[in-house]
Structures are given as C-alpha cells and as structure tokens.
Image (cartoon, coloured by chain):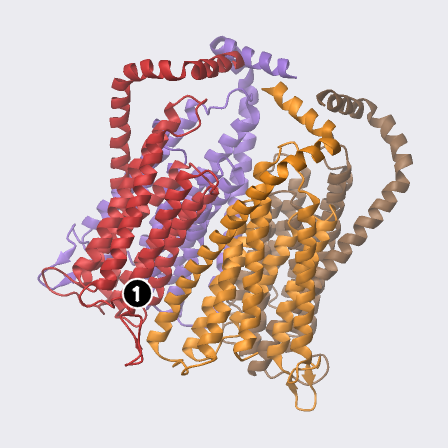
Chain colours: A orange, B brown, C red, D purple
Amino acid sequence: MANFGGHAIPGSFFLLFGLWLTVKHTLQRYWRNNQLKGRALLPPFFKRMDYIEGGLQIFASFVGIMVEQFVVDGPHARLYDAHNHSWVKLMNWQHSTMYLFFGISGIALVVSTASKLVPVGVDRLALSLALFVEGFLFYYHVHSRPPLDAHIHSLLLVAVFSGSASTMMEVFMRDRFILEMLKAVLFILQGSWFYQIGFVLYPPSGPQWDLTLHNNIMFVTMCFCWHLVLALFVATCTSTAVWITTRRMSRRARDIEMVMRKKSSTANSEKALLEESEEE
Amino acid sequence: MANFGGHAIPGSFFLLFGLWLTVKHTLQRYWRNNQLKGRALLPPFFKRMDYIEGGLQIFASFVGIMVEQFVVDGPHARLYDAHNHSWVKLMNWQHSTMYLFFGISGIALVVSTASKLVPVGVDRLALSLALFVEGFLFYYHVHSRPPLDAHIHSLLLVAVFSGSASTMMEVFMRDRFILEMLKAVLFILQGSWFYQIGFVLYPPSGPQWDLTLHNNIMFVTMCFCWHLVLALFVATCTSTAVWITTRRMSRRARDIEMVMRKKSSTANSEKALLEESEEE
Amino acid sequence: MANFGGHAIPGSFFLLFGLWLTVKHTLQRYWRNNQLKGRALLPPFFKRMDYIEGGLQIFASFVGIMVEQFVVDGPHARLYDAHNHSWVKLMNWQHSTMYLFFGISGIALVVSTASKLVPVGVDRLALSLALFVEGFLFYYHVHSRPPLDAHIHSLLLVAVFSGSASTMMEVFMRDRFILEMLKAVLFILQGSWFYQIGFVLYPPSGPQWDLTLHNNIMFVTMCFCWHLVLALFVATCTSTAVWITTRRMSRRARDIEMVMRKKSSTANSEKALLEESEEE
Amino acid sequence: MANFGGHAIPGSFFLLFGLWLTVKHTLQRYWRNNQLKGRALLPPFFKRMDYIEGGLQIFASFVGIMVEQFVVDGPHARLYDAHNHSWVKLMNWQHSTMYLFFGISGIALVVSTASKLVPVGVDRLALSLALFVEGFLFYYHVHSRPPLDAHIHSLLLVAVFSGSASTMMEVFMRDRFILEMLKAVLFILQGSWFYQIGFVLYPPSGPQWDLTLHNNIMFVTMCFCWHLVLALFVATCTSTAVWITTRRMSRRARDIEMVMRKKSSTANSEKALLEESEEE
C-alpha cells in the first residue's frame, strides 16, 4: 500500500521477527552449551516456541492476505476484469503472494516441529523460498520508477536476498549460531529499512524528498550501512541481555531443577555420567 | 516448435519427470529410514528404477531429435544451405542439441547404475549439465523478442538454472532428501511453466495477449510464484501419498518378508544384530 | 579525499595489514605444525597479537573518522544543511562509515579473543562485512565519472569483494592456511592498488593521464594483474622469511624451552606422549 | 596474435593439457582404488608426472612470453613509447601477462610437489588464479568488437571461468575424481573452442563469416554445446582407455610386482595387514 503505514506495518513485523529469532537462537545456544552432552534433544519448551512462531506466521500472513484483498480499494478476490480487459489491482495480488509464501513457511515450521518424518531443514528451505519470492517480486516491482524510489527498493533487495542465501545455507549447516544471528540481523535490517522507505517516500512530516537528486541516492546508500550497524548493535545487545538473564535465572533455578531432575531421570543421567567417567 | 503443442509436449515430459523423481526419492528415503543399518546397499528394485529412468531418457531424447529433424518443415539433418548461404532451421537444431544432452544424462545414469567403476555422481553432473545447456541455449534464444515473450522465457530460466545448481549440489551432497525434492519441485515447476508459456503465447482459445503491456508482465511474474506454490503442493502431496502407501503395503508384506528374509540372509542380519548389541 | 595522499594513506594501511596477516598466520601455522598434538590451544602470545591487531584497528578507524569529520574542509559532524537544503560533504561521511565498519571488526576481534562465549568466527564475519560495506559504498561511488576513473575503481572492487568472499569462507572453514594467505594477498593487492589509483588520478609528477583513452583502460586492467603477481610474490617471500626465521630461532630456543616446559607441564606432556606411544 | 595460427597454438596447448590431466587423474584414481589402504602416499611415479607437468608449464609460458615480446612486430619489452605518448602493443603485453600466470601455476605445482611445507592446494589455487586472470583480461578484451567476434570470445569465457571455479573447488575438496575430470573437460573444451574461434574469425579457406548476422551468433552458441559434447566424449574415451590399459598392464605386472613388493616392503605391508585383521 503506497503510504507510510503500508511500509511501517511490514517493517514492524520484520523487526519483531528478527528480535524473536535473536531471542530464540540465543536460548537454544545457551541450552546447547550448558546441558549434559548425553541429552541431545531440545526440551519441549523449544518445540512450543516453534509452534508459536509457526502459528503466528500462518495467522499473520492469513490476515495480511485478507487485508490486501478486502481493503476498501482492494481487488476483493477478483483477478481479471473482463469488462475492461485489464488485471485488477495487481499490486495487492503481489503482496498477497508474498504473504502466502510466509504462510507456507509457517506451515513448514509447524509440520517439521510436529513430525520427525518431515525431512530436516524443510522449515529453513521454506523461509529461504519466502524471502526469495519476496525479493523476486520486488525486483520486477521497481522498474520505471523515479531513481531514488528504485534505488531505495533495490537496497531492500540486498537485505532480502542476503537473508534468503543465509537461510538457505542453514539448510545444510545446522545449529551454527553465527548463521542464525546473521539471519536475525538481516530481518532486523529489513524491518528498519521498510521504515526508512516509508520515511523517504511518504514523509509523515516535513518536505518531500527530491526523488531524482544524486546526493539523495548517495545519502540513502550510506544510510543503509547505518541501518546495518544499528541492526548488528540491536541483535548483539538483545542476545547478550538474553544470555545474562538466562544464566542468572538458571543459577537460581538450579537447586530446584537439580532436585526435579534427580527424581525424573536419575537413571539416565547417572548412566551417562558413568559412561563418561569410564571413557576418561 | 512455435505453437501450443510445441510447449505442451516438453511441459508434459518435465511434469512427469518431476513426479517420477518425487516418487523415486520418496521410496529411497523410506528404504533408508526403515531398513537395518547393516544393509547399506539399495535393493535391485531401485537399480531397475534407474535403468528404466535412464532408458526412457535415452529413448525420449532420441525420438525428440528425430522429430525435430524429420518433421515436415524440419531441417532433415541438413545444417548449412550452401545455395542460399544460410543456416537451415537453427531453432530445430537448437532443440535437438538440448535433447542430446538429456540423452547423455540418460546414458550417464544407466552406465553409473551398471558399473561401480564409474565415479559416483556422474549421473547428477550430467543432468546438471543438461539443464545448464538448456538454460544456456534459451538465454540466447530470447533476444529481440517482444517484452512479454522475452520475460516469460527468462522466468523459465529461473527454474532451469536453479534446477541445474541444485542438481550440481547433489554431486557433492548425496542422499539429501531435501535437495532431491527441490530438484523434483523445480522440474514440476518447469513443466507447468512450459504449459503457461504455451497458453500465453499461443492461446488455444480466447483472445491474444498483448505482448507489450506492462501489466501482463507483472501478472506473469506473479503467476510464476503461483506455479511454484502449485509445484510445492503437488510434490508434497505425491511424496506423502507414496510414503503412506508404502508404509501400509510394507506392514502387510512384513510377515511374508520376515519369513523370506530369514531364509535368505539369516547369517548376515543376525551377525549385524549381534555386533550392534555387543557395541552397546 | 581527492588527492594523492588521500589514496596513499589507506593504501599504506591495507598494505601493512596484509603483511601483518601474512606474518601472523605463518606463525600460527608454524605453531600448529610443530607443537604436540595434545596441546590444541594457541599460546598467550597469539592472543596478545590479536589484541594488538584489534586495538590498532579500533584506534586507526577512530582516528580516520575524526580526521574525515574535522579536517579543515570536512563536515564537522554536520550531516544536513537545513539552510541550503543539501547534504554536507557526503564523501567524508561515506569514508567515515567505511572506517566505522573496520572499527567494528576490531571490536569483534578483541571481544572474541577475550571471551569464549562469543560465537566462533564473529571476528571474520565482521571483517568480511567491513570489506563488503567498503565495496558496497565504492560501487555506488563511481557512477558518472570519466571512464578510466570508473574503471580503476571498479578494479579495486574486484580485490575488495574477493577479500570479503574469502573472509566469509573463513567463517566456515577455520585454520585453512591457504584461505588465510589468500585474504592477506588480497589486502596487499588492495593496498598497492590504492597507490596505483593515486598515481593515475593524481600523478604527483609528470603529465596527467587521459581519462577517456581506451588504451589507458586496457593498460590499467593489465596492471591490476601485475599488482596481483606482486602481492603473491611479497606474501610468499614474507611468509617464507618468517617461517625460516622462526625455525632457526625455535631451534636455538629449544634447549631452554625444553627445560622450562619440563618444569611447568611435565605431567601433561608426558601423559600425552605416553598415550600416543600406546596407540602405536 | 590476430590470425589463425595465433588461436591454433594456444588451442593445441589447452587440448593437450586437458588430455594430460585426464590421463594423470585416471592413473591416480586407479592407484587409489587398487592399492592397499595402508599406503596412503602416491608413489614417486606420480611425483615425477607432477614435476614434468610443472616444468613444461614453466617452459611453455617462458617461451610464450618471449615469442609475444620478441616476435617481429612485438613490443620488444618496451611498454611505453614516450615519443608518441602511447602504449606499445598492449595486446602482446596482455598475452604475456596471461602466460606469466600459467608459469606461476607451474612453479606452484613444482614447489608443492617438492616440499611438504608448502600448504596443500597451492597448485590448484594458482591454476585457478591463472584461469581467472585469463578470463579477466579476455573480458575487457572484447569490448567494441563486431557482435559475432564479441560473442564467440564471451563463450570462451564460459569455459574459462567454469574451469577457474571448478579448480578453486578442488582446493577444498581434494581427490574428487569427478571434479578433476570436469577440469580436464573444460580445458579440452577451451582448446577446441580456440580452434573454432580461429576458424570463424580467420577462416584458412573458404569465405569470410558475416560478423553481424544474427543467425551466425545463434549457430555459434549451439556449436559451443557441440564442442562440450565432444570434450565430454574425448575425456570419457581417453579415461576409459587409460583405465583398461592400466588394468591389463598391472595384471601382467602383478606377479613381478608381488615379488618385488615382498622384498622391499614386507615389514610394512605385513604390519598393516596384521593391524587391520586385529581391528576386525
């Protein structure tokens, strides 16, 4: 939607998604680093996180599609206007298509969390595809626009396609914290850049930007790098905060946990410890 | 061949090939997941599937070359017309070249199934090359055509080159179900997109498309993504159906199989089981 | 800064950085090859080298930013001139942004040397990002310049983006000497090419170059390859010299070291040796 | 050199090099497959092959540089003509630069065969660089030429850059026969394509080609694929012939070899066999 809100809403979603990924992967890393080697499986807590994430993705993209279709000046699920021999509101249809792929990504996440028969990595492949399709549609979106408009959208593509490539690599290299954080950073970057696009193309206050001035293009290019710094900074701070909080909480909880764990899995852990000590 | 049928025939082949790959790789995965670890080799059944696949590829590309050459308005194996100083029917020659590479891919599959001396992965490399050559020839095919015609063919290239890259990765990462399914999906996508090209450029009914209208280009781009959704859906459903059917059949067959296996390979499997139990 | 010095200063930095990397990685390789397998950790000496490297990077980029901002004709930290409705000295701001990323890379190196909680490879990812951002900003830097000017800068991009890709690969393949040396060579190449740019665009003596002559472009392209030969030669010689010197010194020092090591870690090394001899 | 011979000479070199690589890597594979696992080292015979290969590369590139420089209409080692303010025979200088990199690749091969201190893979990296530089210089070579001339050279680049990428992958994945054969095929392709360029641009007999006709461009594109088929065929036949010959010879030689091996390395192989049997 060609106004400030139409860029702020997806921007907010991507920002929140990037933050969520930062938190999730930091918690997973904490777990991997601090648990006994004998317990390779992630606890049900992480499964529930994935269900929530997938469910929200499905819900959000369903709402997104509905809004794009049935907003006042939307296509109302009509694709071709046979009377005028023209397509109806292709822009809204394109956005719906993008949402659809994020919805599929959500379904893939839920299904691959629920069943072990689903091949490993399907969720990441689906997310990578969703980003690819987003970039693919944007790429043909920006033809024949004023220079600054085209440029600021093509910068978005840098974040989108990098995110797609980084997520694709996760299909083959699992549980690499650095790749997971890179993905999160690129989502945060994408989110904040959506805001920037909104501010530049539809300034909520102040004068309009000159969309043909070369200096504006130069500034916007540099500004993209600043957003990257910001995204790196936000992700690092969030991750550190989560790590420290978790450590403090888990220390406090250790005594209780120790007691509980002893009751529930004495046999297992003792056996694992015994085996380890025998190997040394 | 510049008509609807000329796009529907290759489209059907690619569609069927994609479905075949889905079925084959799902069966292979079922086998890998459900057999004893001691038996690493695939059974003769899979070998026979590969022979059939390779044989059909060779046969189909031979027929394809013959048709392209000896169709009524074909070149009849003449390449250069010395009288007019011009090349004869280069389009047909180009299509013959594409078929030739798929034929080579078939030969590579048969040979690498038959002999262990052939280096591992030659079949995938040959298939990747065949797709690359297809894309390579199409790439120089589409110059100086009307915008929509060029665009719809360049979208085909996305499927073709992605397929080539994905198959090339299989040379180095074997037995990754997710890569194999990606390849199958991209073949299905290619097949259905051939149909789409036929419907757009040579509509069997209804009015002609305006090949210069920007909105048509925008619609076609989005339509490509819908084909991708469809291909993902078809591949997922086929794979799930095959999986469930196989599981049901194999359960019914288990009793008989158990008896047969006991007779034929008692020594082997018992030894394997013994070794495993000793290791624990 | 558009003069000879403005290219010689970054050139010298990159040259020195490339040489430093050559020395550091050669020493690390010597250590890996010549130490007992039982001691996987690098000695504190290498940690100190990384602290120095990171510290210098932070310091140099801080100085660079300050100079770019507060030089006589600099922007003095003003970004937008509301009076003239124009951006202030975007060139200096762009250079500051580049320095900022190298500073971040320095911080990442220091932090990841100091703490084991920081995920492995963050330092290389940050360096790769710094090079990517440098190339990214340069890429939009060179539009609408005379042909030779644009060409000579785009050749720089070859070195910069190759360096970024090579460093990115180091994130996933650690302790590969050949990748580390490639990175060093590409930094030396970048450094010497900065000098070349200075000599061509702002010749300190002699006539100006004709910035539109095709032959000049051809020469400059070839000259880039010669710089590559030179960089390969310099890196090889430096590495060999460091290797030979270290071997000579370590032989002389062995007697003393042997005595010292015996005292400090008799138990450890004896145990490791014993285990190894038992395995044979 | 702009004549038929100037393309036939490098073409012959690349053809022979491709064939040589096919023979060498097939022999190495035969050795790897047929020797005892206990002997990981390649025999001195392969070392001698590498010395010869490297030596010939150095020699050929030295002769190439000399010829390019001191041919009658060559630059005679003069780079800049201060009198006319122009560069002297840049084409010859560019060719000399290409030869130089193949010479460096030869040096890298010799040195890395001779010493174990040289990091593994330096020879392949150097060959990959040589191909990259060749492609890099050709890329800026073909600007502002007639369409067919530019096109036929840009097809060469496909072979050159693919070869560079494939050789670069060998740096990280060693002893993969399929990659080695791909490299060999791409060298044969490059060689035969040089001949094709010679035949098209400087036909030794018959009429000149029309360098602007679109159909000629289409034919040449297809012709490149036929060269690829040819290269695949030649490499496969050569490799098979070498394999069969080696097997026949090694069977005949086995009796003698067995006797000799017993004398020279009884202790070693017996020990290895013993260890293996103990492990079972």
For disc 1, the marked residue is C93
Pinpoint residue D247: horizontal percent, then vertical percent: 56, 27
Q: Nearer the viewer, residue A3 or A30?
A: A30
Residue A129 picture quarter: bottom right
Chain letter of the residue beneath label 1 in the structure image: C
Pinpoint residue A46: horizontal percent, then vertical percent: 66, 48
Residue C5 picture quarter: bottom left
Number of labels in the image equals 1
Question: In the figure, B250 relative to A145: above or below?
Answer: above
Viewed as shown, does residue B15 lie left or right of D8? Answer: right
Pinpoint residue C64: horizontal percent, then vertical percent: 25, 56
Q: Quadrant of the N terminus of chain A?
A: bottom right
Residue at position x 62%, y 33% in the image: A36
Amino acid identity at mark 1: Trp
Viewed as shown, does residue B254 lie left or right of D271? Answer: right
Q: Quadrant of the C terminus of chain A?
A: top right
